[in-house]
Image: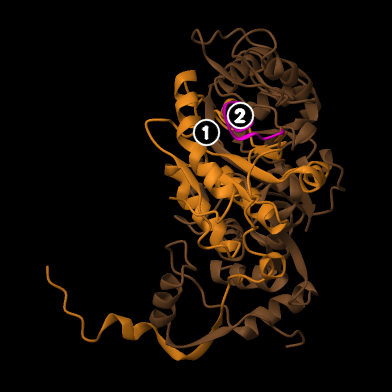
Chain colours: A brown, B orange
Amino acid sequence: MTTSLKQPSRTFNTYDAFLDDAQKSGWSDGLPLVPATPWRVAECLDLMGLEAREVVGAVPSRDLEVTAEHVAINALMAGCRPEYLPVVLSAVRGHLDPLGNSHCTTATLTGASQLVVVNGPARTELGIQCGERAFGPGSRANATIGRAVRLVIRNACQNIPGDADRAAFSSANRYSFCFGEDEESTTWTPLHVQRGFAPHTSTTTLYSMTDMFALHRAAPSAPESFLDELVHLARCRPITRDAFLGDTRAVLIVVGPEHREMLEAAGWSKADLQAYLFPRLAAPHTRVSAPGARGESADGQGLHALGGPEESCFELTKPENVLIVAAGGAGSNLTWILYPHIAAAVTYPV
Amino acid sequence: MTVTLESPARSAFSIDVFQALDPSTRRSASANQCGGEAVGLPSLNGKTVAFISNGMGSATLLHKALASRLRDRFGVAETFLVRKSSVSVPPSPDDWEKIKDTADAGVTLFGGCGSCSSRTTRDAIEMEWAGIPAVAIVHAALAGSGHAMRRMSRMDDYPLLEVGYPLAPTAVWPDEDIEATADALLPQIVARLVGSRVLS
């Protein structure tokens, strides 16, 4: 061990005793945990080349700083292999980025979850699922990386359900939500390359989201009709402008293999999709609210009547903020719209 | 079918003595900032009151109703509104400087959602730390969020003013409800800003 650990430790005689104590101490999401022994934590920190006390990020509203040691402990408790730690660290940096808006996205009534999208070589090196069952169980890497981020949020960011965490219904995605982009089965430019990273650089994109809807459409006749349906579905749910996020407000769309094949065969790139979708998603709509309905104006300067030509359904500012990701397995003809909570999609290198 | 275990199942999990590290952060940083509650004002007459609003629900309208009452009934010389850029973030550095430079007292509102109720509480606490008596208004349904924040801020007993049902936490309320709520809150707000700062 070459680094000096700062966190206190407890001694246990049995694994059951550890589990009982961890549950009683509020460390667990309800599932069993792996004990983070000092030796294993030190091994992980050495692997990452980090000192235990190195600050990874902070939650200013809660007066707390998250260190590399916190990340290592929670990742091991989540069941991560040591080699997953750099990916977890990258995702935690994204969450604790000011535009990740940690306090807002974790204390919220909505039960927003934190999705980790992995790009680059780390996906294949670690066995991160990108195709079939990308959203669900079956891969240790997907399951434990996503869980590690949530345990950091719970324990290091002090987001305990019923205390700072006020989720009304919460979400199963809060146990774990991590997948990789299926870069090998598409000609499209990977998400991280679109966001300015080299193809050989591994990245995580941390995206706090509220809920998700699927467009199921078998054998669409043409890209335009398919995309128009996607727009119609998406606009049933508004995304409002947020002055704090400014021009970083984004929405994430995960396109399954059949729809990718149809779009790619017609010569559509991700940039083409963004150029087509953006003006249609952001176009003013004509919904008229009930008489007397009113709400806060988007610029925060006062009240106005809801509805009317000034109101956009998706108040995005540029095509690049329609984030397109290739993932999922064959046979379902699905494309997913993942709605953002009040945070940017934040990409960090691994 | 009845299955009889030959030995207790938990024995299968018995292992050698081991140590496990605590994964959580401890309260520490705020201890350097915490100055406790500010001293109450002798009166509100001639004073300046800052409102920090997150724009949630009826925050803007409730601010207007309260500000006019403080001016008309308690001689407050000036009120000003700081509208935050998002529901659960601090005021901008420039706004915060203005508050510290010009405000004698503060009101933060409105704690109508999970994260904004805790941040509304925190806004009031940070004004207290700056020597400005303040009061946070939250919905009763989200009071637990404010309580979490005051604990994290080492201000466990810091009082919050609550608005309850049938007013919905995140909705814009009818005008008559806003006026009635302002009337109901006003004595409590004044009690928390002046004198011994004790709620009756």
Viewer-closest of B143 and A336: B143
Specify the quadrant of the image occupied by residue A207.
Answer: top right
Horizontally, residue A272 falls left or right of residue A24, namely right
Q: Residue A258's mark?
A: 2
Image location (x, y in percent) of residue B197 = 55, 54
Q: Which residue is mark 1?
A: A331
The verdict on a common chain for dots 2 and 1 is: yes
**Picture quarter containing residue B168?**
top left
Q: Residue at x 50, y 68 (%)?
A: A27
Please state which of residues A60 and A181 is positioned toward the viewer in this rendering. A60
Q: Position of residue A121 (x, y in %)?
A: 77, 55
Q: CA distance from mark 2 to mark 1?
A: 8 Å
Q: Amino acid at mark 1?
A: Gly
Q: Is residue B65 above or below residue B13?
A: above
From this view, report whether residue B4 is shown above or below residue A282.
below
Amino acid at the residue labelled 2: Glu
Res A328 seen here: no
Q: Is residue A150 above or below residue A334?
A: below
- Asked whether residue B71 is drawn in magenta, I would say yes
Dot 2 surroundings within 10 Å: few (below 14), some, or many (20 or more)? Answer: many
Residue visible at 47% across and 66% down in the picture = A28
| Residue A32 drawn at (x, y percent) | 44, 69
Which chain letter goes with mark 2?
Answer: A
